[in-house]
Image (spheres, rainbow, N blue to C red):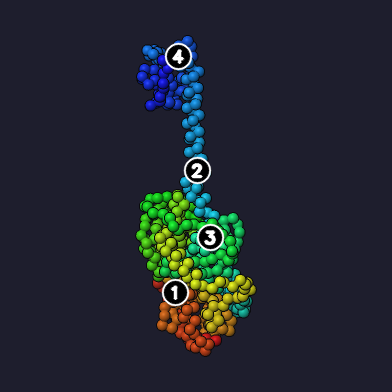
Amino acid sequence: MKAVFTCPGSACVSRAGERVLAPANFPSISRLFAASGSQRKDCFGATPKPARGTRALPGTVCRALVTLLIFATSTSLLAQADPASEPTVLAVAKVLPAVVNINTERVVRRTVRDPFEDFYAQFFGYNRVRPREIRQTLQSLGSGFIVDPAGYIITNQHVVERAADLKIHVTTNDGKTYNAHYVTGDDKIDLAFIKIDAKTDFPFVSLDDISPNILGETVIVVGNAVGYGSSISRGVLSAANRNITVDDIEYKNLVQTDAAINPGNSGGPVIDISGRLVGISSAKMAFTPQGVPTQGLGFAIPADVVRDSVNRFKKIAQKQPAPKSQVRTNEVSVSNAERLFGMQLQDLSRELSSALGYVQGRGVLITAVEPDSPADEAGVERGLVIYRVGQSDVNSVKQIENLFGRVQSGANVTFTVGVIRASGENHQLATLTLAAR
């Protein structure tokens, strides 16, 4: 009669349960292989007695079975440990071809001084020389991802703000760089829509199947972190439906994660381990209301908002005429503030306000003053802050540009200019009236 063997537990036994043949637990294997002599012992050291109607397997067969078991188990463990089969790796490989790096350029005129000359002028009464004017290319970096094979890209609005003055370059994951143009955007949700100027099909992230955004699920941030393209960070979805306020704009129903979100990640996708979209990361939201960078705390615009916005943006894109093919590379863009009053302005970010010791969230910084301009003749100097134009408090360059857009040459405009310190001391404000040139 032929015995049939199974391995229901830690040792191989006959179906009748009367004979132990080989262990499945590895610590006992050495004892089995070390056993020698005329009598074979089982893995517990006892001399087995053959059951009626059964026949003991030879030692060579038993050892072969154990070797086969070890080999099969090792192969299974190696397969499970293969990094190429990890869910995170598969999810990144699925999405990465559609992720792009966004580089924007804007050529401006800058009036500069020698810092050593300024030092001597301040402390030793050294006569200042006329500052020299240079052309400077301002660059910003961000991320985005393609949502349509025609080359439409979704990103953050703040990555491509002032897009009318920008040249936008998009670099895909395969290293190719394309020109792109701004289609539309929404400041309230910090989303923008741009399109690659090329007639080819691109890999894209589908928005038809988005992540359910379950609390605690693994999420992956993909993007151009601090200039390093195709960077990956991983964490969990920490919370949903968060409302925060940044630069006087309230963003609602954000998702929160502990995955690292750095400058440059803005506009890049946050995905789950199935490669479905969780949201769009935004580095501008990685600060407390007091301007302190958060630790292990980042926010993303949820996928359902992204999907609805893309559908809305596509309808706008269909109504727009095709962009002009020529690109004006040597044109110098001049702002209304510079054209009318000879001032170059810059937004006071949290970092810049902290570095200068100015109160945060108020005013626009004057970075340069053109010689013999209305601002220069009125005594305006770089480093001062514009807090009010006419009857309007101002907190951004865009806001001032909109106000100056209605100003005609020869018109008088009243400014409140000075410095308000974060310490609450030494407030120095003055009201000036400048005639637009």
- Residue 350 in view here: no
Q: Nearer the viewer, mark 2 or mark 3?
A: 3
Q: Which residue is mark 4?
A: 40
Distance from disc 3 to disc 4, alpha carbons, whole Å, reads 70 Å
Q: Quadrant of the C terminus?
A: bottom right
- State the image coordinates of residue 5 (x, y, percent, origin top left): 41, 22
Q: In this view of the protein, which residue sits in the foreground, 412 or 196?
A: 196
Distance from disc 1 to disc 4, alpha carbons, whole Å, reads 89 Å
Q: Earlier in the sequence, mark 2 or mark 1?
A: 2
Q: Earlier in the sequence, mark 1 or mark 4?
A: 4
Q: Which residue is mark 1?
A: 395
Q: Amino acid at mark 4?
A: Arg
Q: Earlier in the sequence, mark 3 or mark 1?
A: 3
Q: Amino acid at mark 3?
A: Pro
Q: Residue at x 36, y 52 (%)?
A: 215
Q: Quadrant of the N terminus?
A: top left
- State the image coordinates of residue 321 (x, y, percent, origin top left): 54, 73
Mark 2 residue crowding within 10 angstroms, few (<14) / some (14–19) / many (20+): few
Q: Earlier in the sequence, mark 2 or mark 4?
A: 4
Q: Nearer the viewer, mark 2 or mark 1?
A: 2
Q: Amino acid at mark 2?
A: Ser
Tell whether 138 sits left or right of 313.
right
Q: Earlier in the sequence, mark 2 or mark 3?
A: 2
Mark 4 residue crowding within 10 angstroms, few (<14) / some (14–19) / many (20+): some
Q: Which residue is mark 2?
A: 85
Tell whether 398 sits left or right of 333.
left
- State the image coordinates of residue 312 (x, y, percent, origin top left): 44, 67
Q: Secondary structure at mark 4?
A: loop
